[in-house]
Amino acid sequence: MSISFYDVKTRESVDVPDGDVSKTKYERTTKDGKVQVRYALRGSYQGRNLTKFVSQATWDTFSGPVV
């Protein structure tokens, strides 16, 4: 199976195999002091790193390593 990413450099959608995809969380604190969490999948394609933001449900079901 593969994950579809958008490659900004070539301006096209590319498929990256699951073995080259990891998952990560981006956390930041807002002005109000709340913590905002964004979930993303990170893939490597032709030497470039690609990022795709996904929902928490999709992030939880993906079985790749957490970076």
Image: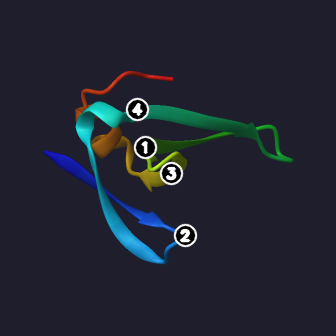
Residue tagged 1: 43
Instruction: Give the amino acid at mark 3.
Output: Thr
The tag earlier along the polypeptide, 3 or 2, is 2
Label 4 – label 3 distance at C-alpha: 10 Å
Residue tagged 3: 51
Determine the residue located farthest toward the bottom in the rendered image. 11
Residue tagged 2: 8
Residue tagged 4: 22
Q: Quadrant of residue 58?
A: top left
At x 83%, y 45%, the residue is 32
Label 4 – label 2 distance at C-alpha: 19 Å
Image marks 1 and 4: residues in contact by CB distance under 8 Å: yes
Which one is nearer the viewer's eye here, 49 or 25? 49
Foreground: disc 4 or disc 2: 2
Foreground: disc 3 or disc 1: 1
On screen, residue 61 versus residue 24, left or right, reads: left
At x 35%, y 70%, the residue is 13
